[in-house]
């Protein structure tokens, strides 16, 4: 019996030890609360100790969660039981799992802010030109009047830009970065456009206007006064500027004559009156006179030909009146009118030809004046007035002519009434008849047989 009770007590102790070890392995250790903010802070001393203990415990345990050196069937000793009880009483807090998205966000927050402020109309070349011009002249007004920037700036804009380059760290930093990227040749070209200072003009004005200075003269001037001239000046540039000063009488030995005051001012009309016409040389040019005579004869001949061809004019063209303006379509000589959208054709003879005018073919009514006429034949049709006062249109072209919607084919004719619509290759016209004049013609035609 005693042996049986002893074996039971040992079995109970082994079961209790297994339960404790299983509870330790199952992870009944409470979790530590962690903040959800993306702020990286330093760990305290107790957190560092806890994380080191957790790392050591995870290394000591095997992949199955059982400590090495202990078999599954062996019973724990009393010393091991004490260690297990101590470890359970003092729970180990696991270190918080690092979020993979946190380092990226922290890196983004640590990066310096990139300023993307728009520089406006000011370009790096303009900034460099402004800086060099101000350093040379010390006058913003002279810079505004004499410097040619990429676009037109007002004096106020130039002042604001200069103060921004001096006192605004963001704009000055961006401008300096942009100017560093300029090509050396562009920088040299910009520096050559800098205005001349007063000291430079005074040195150049001392060169006599009557002398003929060479490039060596201006090169010696640059070597003698290096502190007065800009480093970008060359002998050729000084020579050109000296010639410009000489042209405007700005040299020391040049004087400008003052204008006379009062009535002594001589204007152009007074000078013209003082000229003696007899003293002027009258050089005759026989060749020019002969050409003028020939041109005069040619013009008179053309005028005579036009006068002789007046009776041959069978149709006159006049533009349509503007909207709101009414003008009579007929006069005493107009028999009928072919009225379009753009122009109107006045029929003043008993027969007129319609078509498209070319160099070799002259017709009375050129339909190209109304619109596109490349589909119209050179001689499309003929409008004729009969003795009885009736108008007929005959088609002599390839395309049909539509009169009030009725096609008139080639080699056929059709009667035209008042207000008839004539369509030729998508060009529409209204045919208007002068009823009064036609009535007179009919009356005269009726009298002739009676006589």
Image (cartoon, rainbow, N blue to C red):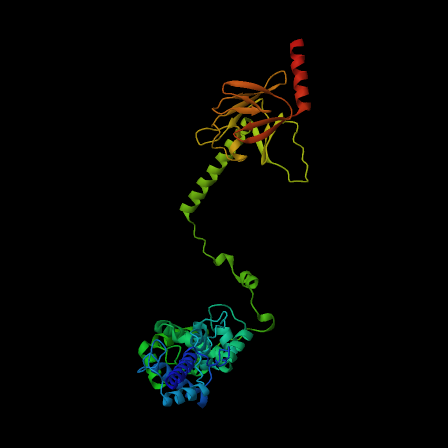
The reply to whether residue 133 is visible in this rendering is no
In the figure, residue 266 lies in which quadrant? Answer: bottom right
- In the picture, measured across the screen, residue 171 lies left or right of residue 235, that is right
Question: Percent x, y for residue 331?
Answer: 66, 29
The reply to whether residue 185 is visible in this rendering is yes
Residue at the far top: name it.
450
Along the viewing direction, whichever of 19 and 7 lies nearer the viewer:
7
For the N terminus, give its image quadrant: bottom left
In the figure, residue 178 lies in which quadrant? Answer: bottom left
Along the viewing direction, whichever of 363 and 111 lies nearer the viewer:
111
Question: Percent x, y for residue 176?
Answer: 43, 78
Query: Is 121 located above or below residue 432 in the figure?
Result: below
Question: Percent x, y for residue 415?
Answer: 59, 19
Question: Percent x, y for residue 188?
Answer: 37, 74
Query: Is 366 located above or below residue 154 in the figure?
Result: above
Number of callouts: 0
Name which residue lies at 52% across and 29% down: 425
For the C terminus, give its image quadrant: top right
In the figure, residue 186 lies in which quadrant? Answer: bottom left
């Amino acid at each position: 019996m005693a042996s049986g009770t002893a074996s039971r007590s040992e079995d109970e102790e082994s079961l209790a030890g297994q339960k404790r070890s299983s509870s330790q392995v199952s992870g009944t250790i409470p979790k530590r609360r962690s903040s959800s903010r993306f702020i990286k802070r330093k760990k305290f001393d107790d957190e560092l100790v806890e994380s080191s203990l957790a790392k050591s415990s995870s290394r000591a345990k095997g992949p199955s969660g059982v400590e090495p050196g202990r078999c599954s069937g062996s019973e724990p000793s009393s010393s091991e039981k004490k260690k297990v009880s101590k470890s359970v009483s003092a729970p180990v807090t696991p270190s918080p799992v690092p979020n993979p998205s946190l380092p990226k966000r922290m890196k983004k927050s640590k990066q310096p802010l990139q300023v993307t402020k728009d520089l406006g109309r000011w370009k790096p070349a303009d900034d460099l030109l402004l800086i060099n011009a101000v350093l040379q002249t010390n006058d913003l007004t002279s810079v505004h009047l004499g410097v040619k920037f990429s676009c037109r700036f007002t004096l106020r804009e130039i002042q604001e830009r200069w103060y921004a380059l001096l006192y605004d760290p963001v704009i000055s930093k961006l401008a300096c970065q942009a100017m560093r990227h300029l090509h050396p040749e562009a920088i040299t070209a910009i520096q050559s456009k800098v205005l001349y200072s007063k000291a430079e003009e005074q040195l150049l004005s001392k060169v006599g206007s009557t002398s003929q200075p060479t490039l060596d003269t201006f090169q010696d001037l640059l070597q003698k006064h290096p502190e007065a001239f800009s480093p970008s000046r060359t002998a050729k540039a000084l020579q050109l500027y000296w010639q410009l000063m000489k042209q405007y009488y700005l040299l020391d030995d040049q004087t400008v004559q003052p204008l006379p005051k009062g009535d002594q001012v001589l204007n152009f009309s007074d000078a013209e009156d003082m000229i003696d016409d007899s003293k002027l040389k009258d050089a005759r040019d026989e060749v020019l006179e002969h050409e003028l005579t020939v041109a005069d004869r040619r013009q008179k001949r053309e005028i005579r030909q036009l006068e002789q061809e007046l009776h041959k004019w069978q149709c006159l063209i006049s533009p349509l009146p503007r909207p709101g303006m009414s003008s009579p379509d007929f006069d005493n000589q107009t028999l009928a009118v072919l009225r379009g959208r753009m122009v109107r054709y006045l029929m003043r003879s008993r027969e007129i030809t319609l078509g498209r005018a070319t160099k070799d073919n002259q017709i009375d009514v050129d339909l190209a004046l109304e619109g596109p006429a490349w589909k119209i034949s050179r001689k499309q049709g003929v409008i004729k007035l009969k003795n009885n006062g009736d108008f007929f249109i005959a088609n002599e072209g390839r395309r049909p002519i539509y009169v009030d919607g009725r096609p008139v084919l080639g080699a056929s004719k059709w009667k035209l009434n008042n207000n008839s619509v004539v369509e030729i290759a998508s060009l529409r016209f209204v045919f208007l008849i002068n009823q009064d004049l036609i009535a007179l013609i009919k009356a005269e035609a009726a009298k002739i047989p009676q006589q």
